[in-house]
Amino acid sequence: MSRKKVVLLGATGSIGGSTLRVLRAHPDRLQLVGVAANGNHTELAGICREFDVRHAVLSSEPAYRAARQADDFPKGTELDCGSAALEALATLHEADIVLVAVVGAAGLRPTLAAIEAGKDIALANKELLVLGGAHVIEAAQRKGVRLLPTDSEHNAIFQCLQGHPPEQLDKLILTASGGQFRDTPVSELSGVTPGMATQHPNWSMGPKITVDSATMANKGLELIEAHWLFDLEPERLEVVIHPQSVVHSFVQFIDGSILAQLSPPSMTFAIQHCLLYPDRAPGVEPTTDFRKTFSLDFKAPDYTRYPCLQLAYDALRTGGAAPAIFNAANEIAVERFLAKEIAYLDIPKLIEHSLTKVASHSEPSLDQLLQTDTETRALAQGHTF
Ligand code: NAD
Ligand code: MG
């Protein structure tokens, strides 16, 4: 069997680490041919050594210079730097599939480049779909490449939909853990610190998505992601709080039957499903064990606790560039919160402010979306409370 050749964008992050575990378990099926990271050159060099990777990119110029100075990359690895190099890596001739696990809107250009080059995409990054979903989906359909959802909810839905024509589908129900402040009295949320907001009870993830889970901006981004991936209007997309994070989402059919996909809260299940698709192989860790007693709980989200979720629904209904504004404002709000410039409860306020102030377009071109993204970032960066 020939090995599937994988490019991993965001190799040093949380999804990157889970992907390496999957790659270690299946050396006979998967080969890592290219890796990228932003700034952690020592870790990236280690990955290149372990997996004998031929092509590596560091987006950060200072990190690239430091790597050159340290001379710690193996001789067989070609190291490059910057955003053009990132796009080139995403289109690498020998690659079969590109796993996009960089965080934020920075993932959009390399993903579009990979699609144009005919590569299948395993998509962990959700922000790029929220920003440029229409363009990404159009390009993927035009080029006939697979867009494999790696975000656990969308991967669950993708698995449940196999073999069912779209006309049989009624709605999608995305599960959400409710984050670390699920049971904190709303009156105490004003005192939430970055240290508290970057600890998740179920999932071990990067800092940005962990804060997004607490505010449920993450589920908001995922609603918009689901809209693009599965072509459904907001009325047919629901969210339910499920504290155990074992059911990764539900699909409800027109006859009322509901299917779900379950596994413990680890991204290795979704990542492996995408990388080996349509094949399956033993997983890298134990799955849900029904010999042990446990319960699964579900409840409707409370929008006063999670205003970001309401804002995301509103942005999706408004359409045009509104989701791009939501995403950019949220990225800056989280950055500023982590830098202790704004309070936790300012995150939804900054998003709402941006949605009212930045002009939207009804059917924005890619350039207009990128301009809206830049404009929103500038506004959200400069806004004071
Ligand atoms: P992270 O912060 O742990 O890792 C981000 C990775 O991207 C790092 O390797 C970093 O070096 C790299 N990176 C950042 N900017 C870059 C740039 N400009 N060029 C090249 N590399 C760059 O983030 P994460 O938690 O792994 O999340 C990655 C993406 O996957 C996010 O979009 C997130 O929403 C999504 N996602 C994550 C999880 C999870 O469990 N962590 C689950 C579902 C979806
Ligand atoms: Mg998710």
Image (spheres, rainbow, N blue to C red):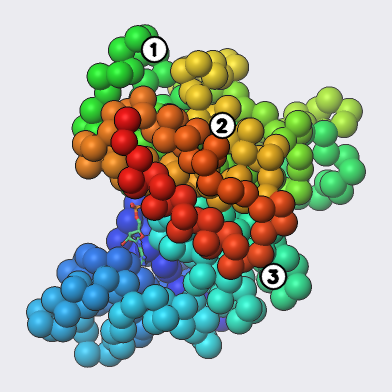
| Image quadrant where residue 73 sits | bottom left
Disc 3, SS: helix
Percent coordinates x, y for residue 330 in the rendering: 43, 42
- Please name the residue that numbered disc 2 is placed on: 311
User: Which numbered disc, 2 or 1, marks the residue closer to the eye?
Assistant: 2
- Please name the residue that numbered disc 3 is placed on: 139
Residue at the location (67% across, 29% down)?
238
Q: Is residue 154 above or below residue 277?
A: above
- Category of crowding for the residue at label 2, using alpha-carbon neighbours closer than 10 angstroms: few (below 14), some (14–19), many (at least 20): many
Is residue 210 shown to the viewer in this render? no
User: Which numbered disc, 3 or 2, marks the residue closer to the eye?
Assistant: 2
Residue at the location (29% across, 74% down)?
58
For the residues marked 3 and 1, what is the alpha-carbon distance in whole angstroms? 43 Å
Residue at the location (39% across, 12% down)?
186
Disc 2, SS: helix
Q: Is residue 73 above or below residue 163?
A: below
* The residue carrying mark 1 has its beta carbon less than 8 Å from ligand 2: no
Residue at the location (55% across, 37% down)?
356
Disc 1, SS: helix
Residue with the most extreme left position: 70
